[in-house]
Image (cartoon, helix red, strand yellow):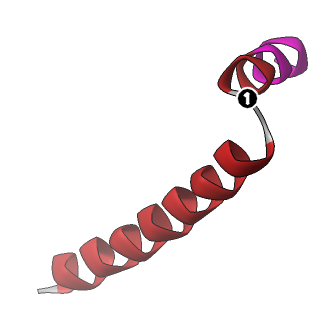
């Protein structure tokens, strides 16, 4: 089934996002991230 491939792709993307989150958390305080996201949108 092609669904398996899609799931694997999504899992990879999630892993990438989690790694980015860890980096952000190391460099910024959570409130800074929230305010940045808020002001950008």
Residue 9 left/right relative to 38 = left
Classify the position of the C terminus by image quarter: top right
Q: Quadrant of residue 25?
A: top right
Region in magenta: 35-41
Q: Nearer the viewer, residue 27 or 5?
A: 27
Where residue 36 appears, as percent x and y from the top left, is 85, 22
| Picture layout, residue 27 above or below residue 3 | above
Where residue 8 appears, as percent x and y from the top left, is 30, 80
Kindly identify the residue that appears in the image at 71 percent across and 19 percent down.
34
Q: Is residue 40 magenta?
A: yes
Q: Is residue 19 magenta?
A: no
Classify 10 Å Cα crowding around label 1: few (below 14), some (14-19), many (20 and above).
few
Q: Nearer the viewer, residue 38 or 8?
A: 38
Q: Nearer the viewer, residue 10 or 1?
A: 10
Q: Which residue is mark 1?
A: 29
Q: Quadrant of residue 28?
A: top right
| Picture layout, residue 35 above or below residue 9 | above
| Picture layout, residue 25 above or below residue 2 | above
Which is the main secondary structure of the residues drawn in magenta?
helix
Q: Nearer the viewer, residue 10 or 16?
A: 16
Residue 41 left/right relative to 5 = right
């Amino acid at each position: 089934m092609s669904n398996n491939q899609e799931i694997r792709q999504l899992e990879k993307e999630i892993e990438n996002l989690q790694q980015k989150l860890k980096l952000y958390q190391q460099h910024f305080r959570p409130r800074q991230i929230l305010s940045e996201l808020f002001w950008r949108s």
